[in-house]
Image (spheres, grey):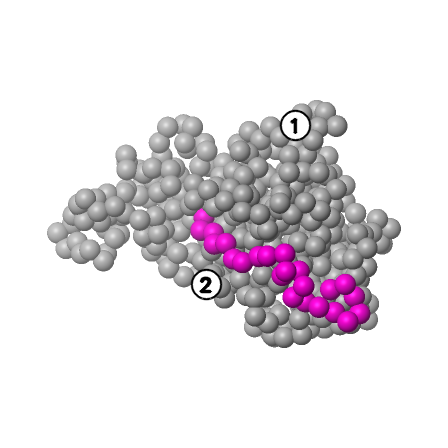
Amino acid sequence: MTTAVNIFLKQGTITSNWQQHNTVQIVNDDLHICLKEGDKLPLRTIQKAARKIEKMGVAQAQLTGDNWAENEQWAFAMGFTCVGKLTNVGFTGDSNLVTRLTDKLVVYAWSRDLTNQTPAELYPTQLAQLAKDYIAALAPQAVTSELISGEDLVEQGWMGIYNVGKGSVHPPCLLVLDYNPTGDSDAEVAACLVGKGITFDSGGYSIKTSAGMFDMKCDMGGAAVVSGALALAIKQGLNKRVKLFLCCAENMISNNAYKLGDVITYKNGLTVEVANTDAEGRLVLADGLMAASETGATTIIDAATLTGAAVMATGGDYTALFSLEQEIAERAKVAANIECEPVWQLPLESWHQDNCPSNFADTANSRTLKGGGAGGASNAAGFLSRFVSQPEHWLHMDLASIYNASGNSLWAAGATCQGVATIARMIND
């Protein structure tokens, strides 16, 4: 068994050679994170200190002492955990706090591990199955599901998922999972979660560069985040009916792959010309948003690694938020602030729907410009808004901070799955 190293959070000088810039101090066999007496230690500083401690070769961290509040403990956990150590933090405090943080870390570890899996391990139906099994195990009596795959997608009219995924040997699929703790089959659906589940994105015929393709195993991160959010909400006592829609496909090149210039006719009658096969996420999410709208839910949240434009706008440090109504955006900001998950609202107006025109269809899925041209993230959100019957209930989360190709001062390499706790809080309120 690995021996845990005690980690204390302190203020004031610990060792005689202490310097202000050196926040991690070694005392005997323990580690101390500290600042000058009276200074407040920012969460970001704690997370950076945790990264330093992990890099020192500490395998298991045990938070110790009276100064660890909930947010400080979570900041440490996010900095310390990494591939191979996704749950290697022991929390401190009363039993309720320890249980709450442990449950949260376990769910994040599952979502992060799912996102980190290789494309060979994680294909569309496998992603759907793993999500279904994980959530169903938490509430066996309250969960039912349907998996629609391959040609059955065509029969039921889910043409976006089908066209994006038809070029792969692994069939595309739509998972519809119903969490209904009420026992009433007629109970209203309080919320719907829609996740982009592109298990690998080559870019299709609008092929990515090798460097751009290297990390595309993470393109199913939206599915991992919304699945984790539902799982966490269940662990926290969710007592409302929530439906989950995972839109899963591999975007590959083959003799059967969809092509530039193809026109897809959606279930709602809208026609979409394919201007860029690498703008596939919005094509699959369109199906999920229509399915969610059919439920009449008063909260619809989609999450996706949708655009490079959102990463450029936020620096990869924030989840980008989009909504046509400010009320749901403000709810997201409040939840994110409580959960210490940085978010930033980017522009979205109804006229963004018209920013990807087509001569041959109602709209195109992008523009034939690098990155979709100026305002690419807003234009993508505008495209999605066409498929939501009641836009005032809808929030789009472009997950710009979900994955790091290499480690930095705050995060280890791999998935962060930022957004899980924010969404869980929104559907639990």
Q: Is residue 372 above or below residue 98?
A: below
- Which residue is more in the foreground, 379 or 44? 379
* Residue farthest to the top, as pictured: 183
State whether residue 60 appears in this view: no
Q: Compute the Cα span from label 2 to label 1.
A: 40 Å
- Which residue is more in the foreground, 236 or 411? 236
Is residue 161 toward the left or the right of residue 113 in the image? right
Q: What span is colored magenta in the figure?
A: 341-363
- Secondary structure of the residue carrying numbered label 1: loop
Q: Is residue 310 above or below residue 109?
A: below
> Mark 1 = which residue?
181
> Mark 2 = which residue?
315
- Residue 334 in percent (x, y) is at 46, 42
Prevailing SS of the magenta stretch: loop
- Which residue is more in the foreground, 249 or 428? 428
Q: Which label's residue is closer to the chain start, 2 or 1?
A: 1
